[in-house]
Image: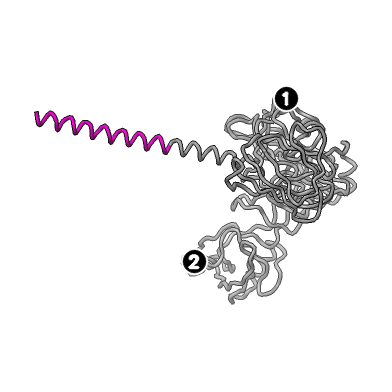
């Protein structure tokens, strides 16, 4: 009898443990589900919103957040919620908005604002900057171009060992230099090229050299002792680069001849970082071959570039995460046939049909695509738009998106909304794009 009671008690105890464990698992699962939901809401709200001066802009997010818009500088904002007939003039210093409904906003002065949002209107949640900008017309281009960049200093792409004149394994620059450093000068003399740098080291006479280095935006000096290799030449044990070339697509040109291209920066092939440049040149290019993309192979456009003065189309001033920027010359401007169109901001982009403009077939032509997703506050600005090529002609020509199409402008509802940036390796018909407002931020 006693054993039976102990058995029941033990069984009951085990059941309580199981029930407690199941309850804990359920609680953790619910908390995880709620946390992921809150995170999803957070990521759907852009950290920065732009409004066109004098135009009504609709924010239709359908999210359980509300808050106040406050002026950072002087200015008036007009705002209405969905269902009202006319905008209400609100000269107050703050305006209440509820993003669970469609909100129409309008600003009549260039100004900046801050929107403090609360989850369910109660819990402090996210701060959003609002900037009023001039409406802008730009011309989508879609033509392939050759790009030549000159690094701002000599880029160190690797540090290694070599055999000295005496047969020893040496590495003079180890612990002093690293990949991604830029060498600006040698013993106070500015470095102009890779060849010039190598000559400076060769002529050092075996004495230590002082290198001025830029690393992560900071400049400092290091002293390095060159060592003779087995050929008798003085070396530092580093690999360096002073330029980069490639083929991409010109995205837009504005009324002053300024251009934006690629939609992403040009990275060094060894360090994978965006190259810091002192300038560059835009060249005409002729597409001589197209390798179709397929699963596991993104494909590419092969261009022939003549690096001659007669083939120059413009100068490059900036290489950034958002693209390559500069100014076109008259030769380039004469090749652009399109008309200026308005830009579309993030809130203007819709899930559904759109087009890209590119010249894979010899001339710039519009091809149909589908906007599948929009990530308004994506950590990677180059992947804010998810798109898929639906045009049978383009798929037949290229298989979808291929290398060299980066920068192809994306047009929807008569507005330039972005540019193609990447292809999905496992699906050549699908890829990513950058919102045009991200490119214009840098281009301006």
The kind of secondary structure element at disc 2 is strand
The residue beneath circle 2 is 170
Residue sitting nearer the eye, 385 or 1: 1
Circle 1 or circle 2, nearest the eye? 1
Q: Nearer the viewer, residue 371 or 161?
A: 371
In the rendered image, residue 76, in percent from the top left (x then y), is placed at 81, 49
Q: Earlier in the sequence, mark 1 or mark 2?
A: 2
Q: Quadrant of residue 195?
A: bottom right
Residue lying at 64% horizontally and 59% vertically, measured from the top left: 155
The local crowd at label 1, few if under 14, some if 14 to 19, many if 20 or more residues have their Cα within 10 Å, is: some
Mark yes or no: residue 309 visible. Answer: yes
Instruction: Please state the horizontal and vertical placement of residue 220, each as a whole percent of the image.
Output: 62, 70
Above or below 2: residue 125: below
User: From which residue to which does the magenta span run?
Assistant: 1-28
Per the rendering, the mark at residue 221 is none
Q: From the viewer's perspective, is 388 left or right of 177?
A: right
Which secondary structure dominates the residues rendered in magenta? helix
**Mark 2 nearby-residue class (10 Å; few <14, some 14–19, many ≥20):** some
Which colour assignment does the render follow? Answer: one colour
Q: CA distance from mark 1 to mark 2?
A: 57 Å
Residue at left offset 59%, top offset 69%: 234
- Taking the spot 46% from the left edge, 39% from the top edge, the residue there is 31
Residue 178 is one of the magenta-drawn residues: no
Q: Is residue 9 magenta?
A: yes
In the rendered view, would you say 295 is above or below 202? above
Tag 1 secondary structure? loop
Residue 391 position in % (x across, y down): 72, 25
Mark identifier at residue 391: 1
């Amino acid at each position: 009898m006693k054993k039976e009671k102990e058995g029941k008690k033990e069984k009951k105890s085990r059941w309580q443990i199981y029930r407690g464990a199941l309850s804990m698992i359920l609680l953790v699962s619910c908390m995880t589900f709620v946390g992921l939901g809150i995170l999803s809401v957070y990521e759907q709200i852009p950290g920065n919103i732009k409004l066109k001066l004098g135009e009504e802009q609709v924010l239709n997010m359908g999210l359980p957040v509300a808050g106040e818009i406050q002026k950072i500088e002087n200015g008036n904002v007009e705002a209405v919620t969905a269902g009202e007939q006319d905008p209400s003039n609100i000269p107050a210093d703050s305006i209440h908005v509820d993003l669970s409904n469609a909100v129409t906003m309008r600003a009549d002065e260039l100004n900046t604002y801050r929107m403090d949002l609360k989850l369910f209107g109660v819990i402090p949640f996210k701060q959003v900057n609002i900037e009023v900008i001039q409406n802008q017309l730009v011309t989508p281009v879609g033509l392939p171009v050759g790009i030549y960049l000159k690094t701002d200093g000599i880029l160190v792409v690797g540090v290694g060992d070599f055999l000295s004149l005496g047969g020893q394994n040496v590495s003079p620059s180890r612990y002093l230099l690293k990949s991604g450093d830029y060498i600006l000068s040698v013993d106070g003399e500015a470095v102009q090229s890779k060849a010039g740098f190598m000559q400076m080291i060769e002529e050092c006479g075996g004495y230590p050299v002082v290198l001025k280095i830029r690393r992560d935006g900071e400049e400092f000096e290091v002293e390095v002792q060159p060592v003779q290799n087995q050929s008798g030449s003085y070396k530092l044990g580093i690999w360096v680069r002073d330029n980069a070339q490639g083929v991409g697509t010109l995205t837009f040109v504005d009324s002053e001849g300024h251009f934006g291209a690629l939609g992403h920066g040009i990275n060094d092939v060894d360090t994978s970082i965006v190259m810091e440049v002192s300038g560059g040149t835009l060249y005409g290019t002729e597409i001589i071959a197209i390798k179709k993309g397929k699963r596991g192979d993104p494909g590419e456009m092969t261009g022939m570039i003549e690096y001659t003065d007669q083939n120059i189309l413009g100068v490059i001033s900036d290489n950034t995460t958002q693209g390559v920027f500069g100014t076109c010359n008259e030769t380039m401007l004469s090749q652009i046939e399109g008309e200026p169109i308005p830009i579309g901001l993030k809130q203007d982009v819709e899930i559904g049909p759109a087009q890209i403009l590119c010249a894979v077939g010899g001339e710039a032509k519009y091809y149909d695509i589908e906007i599948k997703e929009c990530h308004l506050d994506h950590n990677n600005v180059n992947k804010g738009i998810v798109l898929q090529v639906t045009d049978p002609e383009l798929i037949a020509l290229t298989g979808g998106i291929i290398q060299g199409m980066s920068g192809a402008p994306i047009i929807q509802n008569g507005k330039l909304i972005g540019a193609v940036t990447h292809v999905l390796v496992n699906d050549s018909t699908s890829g990513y794009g950058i919102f045009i407002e991200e490119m214009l931020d840098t281009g301006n």
